[in-house]
Image: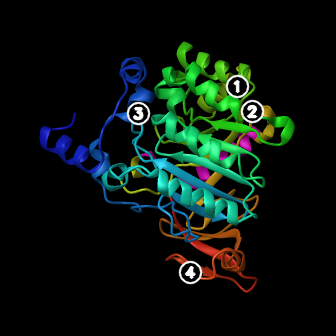
Amino acid sequence: MLKDEQFKEVIEKYPVKITKYLSRLIKKSPAVAKQFLPSRDELKSIGIHRPWVGKVETGIYGLERMYGDRCIIMPINQCPAYCRHCVRKDYLVRSKRAMTYEEIEKALNYIKKHTEIKEVLITGGDPLMDIRRLGYIIKGLRKIKHIGPIRIGTRSIMYDPQRINNKFVRVIKKYHDYREGKPIEISPQFNHPDELTKESIKACRKLIDAGIRLYNQSVLLRGVNDDVKILAELFRKLREIGVEIHYLYHCASVEGADHFRTRVEKGIEIKRIFAGGYLSGRCNPRYIILTPVGKMEPMIDGEILGRKGKILIVKTPYTKKQFIKIDPKFKLPGGCKVDKDDFIICEYLDGA
């Protein structure tokens, strides 16, 4: 149990926010409770303040860019509930203001100008916190000819499924058209079979019945789902209700989440078991780590070169030249260098 002074210290640094729906689920599931209730383990200083942030300077609040053909719009930093493992979990990030409509227009103009951008991810924070602002962004993006898919990252389906209401579905359907190459796709985050309740399954089906593709992105969490049987059950159930299995993220090296982090070799071990016939390929996600310069799939599009204590040395699939092509002012993040072929080598903090 947390003592009063410890509880105060934790929530001052990492706020607690839980929906009514989630509070009922927490009482039934220790795996869900661990993801949302504060812990003294969060006071450990291991980790990075912001391990994931766009590396291409756009100069526009709420618009981040890491890759050549896509970008991220983050209209709001709040969520209906706060995951304790979130890559943007600290108080300062949570308390940042929403994008103004003027800033949204600047972001849309930037995207219109950069014709190499072909798709946009709207995330945050949870963009479902403000449907009006979300609809405004989608409407603006649909006026840009070179933008095809629009993706929405939200965990509301899991922790506040009532947000998947008729109003939201109408907004999405209005601007969703696979036939014209203009789909809208939604990415929920389900991490444990206990999260697939009657309510969350209903929310998934409501979207799927409307023709919206859902692709799940789970996070590998120590003490929650770092088990082959648990993950296999989750992925099979998701497939049964029509949700695609996309990524299994290694928990990011964010400060205050070290107690959730396994070693990368644990994730690779799980993947090997799945690939060995334990799980259908249609249920088998890509296992991803977040390096300082972008996503990497160990042993597939990137390579683990060695280890220095808790630090892995990883070769990413990215070159410095490709970043400079997008942003001439690009500089390598700390702990990164380039090899003789210009591929970026990064230091990556491993888990326990």
First in sequence: mark 1 or mark 2? 1
Q: Secondary structure at mark 1?
A: helix
- Work out whether residue 71 or residue 337 is closer to the camera in this orientation and state it: 71
Q: Main secondary structure of the magenta part?
A: helix
Look at 60% across and 15% down and name the residue there: 202
Residue 301 visible in the shown view: yes
Marks 1 and 3 sit apart, C-alpha to C-alpha, by 27 Å
Marker disc for residue 331: 4
Question: Is tag 1's residue or tag 3's residue first in the polypeptide sequence?
Answer: 3
Measured as percent of width and height from the top left, residue 271 is found at 70, 44
Q: Amino acid at mark 3?
A: Pro
Q: Give the magenta range.
A: 260-274
Indicate which disc, 2 or 3, sits on the residue closer to the N terminus.
3
Residue 80 highlighted magenta (yes or no): no
User: Please, which residue is most extreme toward the left here?
Assistant: 5
Disc 1 residue crowd, few under 14, some 14–19, many 20+, Cα 10 Å: some
Q: Farthest residue to the bottom: give it.
A: 340
State which mark lies toward you, 4 or 1.
4
Which residue is disc 3 drawn over?
80
Please name which of the two marks, 4 or 2, marks the residue nearer to the observer.
Answer: 4
In this picture, residue 6 sits left or right of residue 35? left
Identify which amino acid the numbered label 1 is placed on: Arg
- The residue beneath circle 1 is 236
What amino acid is labelled 4 in the image?
Lys
Any mark on residue 283, and which? Answer: 2
Between 103 and 231, the residue placed more toward the observer is 103
Measured in 3D between alpha carbons, the distance from the residue under mark 4 to the one under mark 2, in whole angstroms, is 38 Å
Give me the residue at 64% from left, 42% from top.
Answer: 139
Residue placed farthest to the top in the image? 198
**Tags 4 and 1 touching, CB below 8 Å:** no
